[in-house]
Image: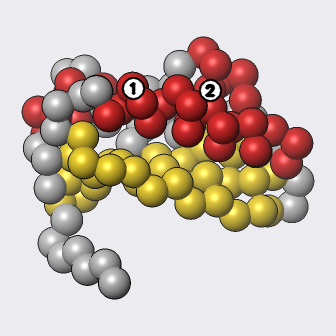
Amino acid sequence: MLARIWKGTTKPAMADRYVSHLQESVIPELGAIPGFRGIYVLRRAEAGADEFLVLTLWESLEAVERFAGPDAERAVVPPKARALLASFETRATHFHVALAHHV
């Protein structure tokens, strides 16, 4: 399994709208992609901005490529998300999941 990690920031007034966008649009779209296995969205308030770390789980690199295209590290940031974000990374990072444990 692969973990795909990406970061973006919003102005504080846009943070809840960004979370709603993820819930209403992005997660359903991801769920339709074969090989998508889950998502964690982490949020922290910084001075003047809310930072988001988005971690998605994929069964393989091929599954990531179904989402991102042949350049698997390219960030996928649709126009609606761009309108809500103050800044974002243009590249994602991938890690092999070596261990997972949930209680």
Image coloring type? secondary structure
Give amino acid for label 1.
Answer: Glu
Residue 93 in the image, given as x and y percentages of width and height: 34, 49
Q: Is residue 34 visible?
A: yes
Examine the rendered structure and indicate whether residue 84 appears above or below residue 39.
Answer: above
Nearer mark to the viewer, of 1 and 2: 1
From the viewer's perspective, tell me whether residue 83 is left or right of residue 27: right
**Residue 51, position in %: x, y?**
68, 54
Q: Residue under circle 1? A: 29
Q: Is residue 71 visible?
A: no
> In this view of the protein, which residue sits in the foreground, 38 or 67?
38
Q: Please tell me in which quadrant of the rendered image residue 102 appears.
A: bottom left
Identified at 32% across, 34% down, the residue is: 31
Residue furthest bottom as drawn: 103
Q: Residues within 10 Å of mark 1 (few under 14, many from 20)?
A: few
Residue 1: % across, % down: 14, 55
Taking the image as shown, residue 77 lies to the left or right of residue 49, namely left
First in sequence: mark 1 vs mark 2: 1
Q: Are marks 1 and 2 in contact (CB under 8 Å)?
A: no
Residue at 60% across / 15% down in the picture? 79
**Quarter of the rendering containing residue 95:** bottom left
Classify the position of the C terminus by image quarter: bottom left
**What mark, if any, has residue 48 been given in the picture?**
none
How many neighbours does mark 2 have within 10 angstroms: few (below 14), some (14-19), or many (20 or more)? some
Secondary structure under the numbered disc 1 in the rendered image: helix
Q: Residue at x 65, y 43 (%)?
A: 19
Q: Residue at x 85, y 48 (%)?
A: 12
Q: Can you identify the residue that label 2 sits on?
A: 81
In the structure shown, which secondary structural element does the residue marked by tag 2 occupy?
A: helix
